[in-house]
Image (spheres, rainbow, N blue to C red):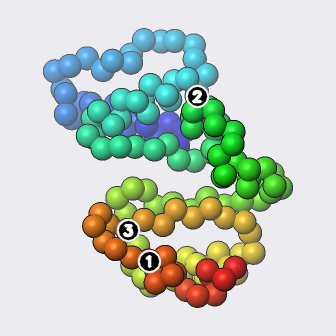
Amino acid sequence: MATGAAAISLGLHTVTKPDVEFPFTEQLRLNLKELEAKYNDYLPILTEKKTIPVGPLVHEIIDGDKDLEIFQWLDEKDELSTVFVSFGSETYLSKEEREEIAHGLLLSGVSFKWTVRFPLGERTEINEALPVEFLER
């Protein structure tokens, strides 16, 4: 998500607030992490939804908490050996789609972190949502 929040913020701002100047037009020499942080803060205001940055996990984006379980787990893996699978916060896969992705991940043999989401209010147990052999691994 290197420029995702910036592009989405600019696009939504242009549509939802056409008469208001975009608040981040200044030309500052910032590194990408500092620049993206502004947009990560502005995007939930525009969408009126909680947003969580995804993509390369950066310690500073998650409040610098180096004790998070995900970082401990990743530290045990070889560099560039883990796949992150996510379809966003508003896309929900059917049972058949989840089974196909699970099968593909098993066949790949790589380490992975998969964010599985269900529609709000849907009560689905993870052992019902994914194949047994997937959960056993």
Residue lying at 74% horizontally and 69% vertically, measured from the top left: 110
Q: Secondary structure at mark 1?
A: loop
Q: CA distance from mark 2 to mark 1?
A: 36 Å
Q: Residues within 10 Å of mark 2 (few under 14, many from 20)?
A: few
Q: From the viewer's perspective, is 95 left or right of 99?
A: left
- With 44 as the anchor, is 105 left or right in this view? right
Mark found first going from the N terminus, 2 or 3:
2
In this rendering, does residue 99 appear at all?
Answer: yes
The answer to the question of whether label 3 and label 1 lie on touching residues, with beta carbons closer than 8 A, is no
Q: Amino acid at mark 1?
A: Glu
Q: How far across and how far down the image is residue 114, in percent?
A: 57, 64
Q: Is residue 16 above or below residue 56?
A: above
**Residue drawn at x 55%, y 23% as measured from the top left:** 34
Dot 3 amino acid type:
Phe
The local secondary structure at tag 3 comes to loop
Disc 2 residue type (three-letter): Lys
Mark 1, residue position = 125
Q: Nearer the viewer, residue 133 or 87?
A: 133
Residue designated by label 3: 118
80 relative to 5 in the view: left or right: right
Q: Residue 33 — which label?
A: 2
> Quick one: quadrant of the C terminus?
bottom right
Q: Nearer the viewer, mark 2 or mark 3?
A: 3
Q: Residue furthest front?
A: 67
Residue 36 appears at what percent x and percent y?
50, 29
Q: Quadrant of residue 91?
A: bottom left
Q: Is residue 124 above or below residue 18?
A: below
Mark 1 crowdedness (10 Å alpha carbons): few <14, some 14-19, many ≥20: few
Q: Which mark is in front, 2 or 1?
A: 1
Height in image: 55 above or below 43? below
Which sits earlier in the primary sequence, circle 3 or circle 1? Answer: 3
The 10 Å Cα crowd at callout 3, few under 14, some 14 to 19, many 20 or more, is some
